[in-house]
Image: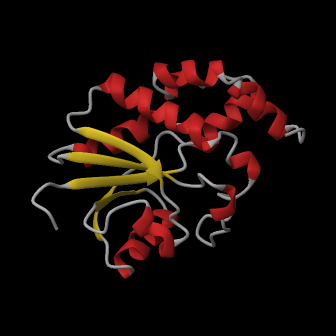
Amino acid sequence: MSDRELAHVHGRFQPFHREHLEYAAWAATGADELLVGITNADPGHVRPEEADSSRHDPEHNPFRYHERLRMVREAIDAAGVDCSVWIAPFPINRPELWEHYAPADAVHYVNVLEEWHRVKARRLREHGRAVVTKAGTRTISGTDIRNRMAAGDDWEGDVPDEVVEVLESIDGVDRVRALFEGEG
């Protein structure tokens, strides 16, 4: 490993919310660089996962990679994360591809909130990756945000203002509603 730490976080970020931003900031603390990996970036890499049986379903993935990249970039830039930040796809369910997306010497940070996160940390370790975990408690979920978007309920308070702006610019609420109504 180099003497510069490259911290790596990853997630679907559907959408990127305030707890995701806290997760990225936690990993960036003390790191020289932060790599934010966006999973389910390429529909060809998406596979069902026993520990999170719905993560591959279209209604759980309404936003495209480039839209999520904008959400992440704009929220992290506005938050002033104190290191260089890179954003790239990360196919967590395709370990044979990881070397193409995240250097082998990256330190993977996983905020363990549910069984799927334990599975990811174990998978990373089994493939020789350095992993730092912390146990947390979820107070915000992308599923809940999407459900509130579809229902016309308040969701904006759970995402950074920059993400609200991106979602408005891409008609994200309408897209979520259409998926929930079976039109997407």
| Residue 34, above or below 120 | above
Q: Quadrant of residue 177?
A: top right
Name the residue at 38% across, 79% down: 127
Report whether 13 appears left or right of 173. left
Image mark count = 0
| Residue 170, above or below 141 | above
Report whether 132 appears left or right of 78. left
* Whole-percent x, y for residue 7 in the image: 27, 53
Of 42 and 52, the residue lying toward us: 42
Residue furthest to the bottom: 126
Name the residue at 69% across, 48% down: 60
* Whole-percent x, y for residue 42 in the image: 63, 55
Q: Classify the position of the N terminus by image quarter.
A: bottom left
What colouring method underlies this structural image?
secondary structure
Q: Is residue 162 visible?
A: yes
Report whether 77 appears left or right of 149. left
| Residue 67, above or below 29 | above
* Whole-percent x, y for residue 144 in the image: 62, 39
Report whether 170 appears left or right of 158. right
Name the residue at 35% across, 22% down: 78
* Whole-percent x, y for residue 111 in the image: 37, 55
Q: Quadrant of residue 82?
A: top left
Of 103 and 108, the residue lying toward us: 103
Residue furthest to the left: 3
Q: Classify the position of the C terminus by image quarter.
A: top right
Q: Is residue 15 visible?
A: no
| Residue 67, above or below 123 | above
Of 31 and 103, the residue lying toward us: 103
Of 13 and 151, the residue lying toward us: 13
Name the residue at 62% across, 69% down: 49
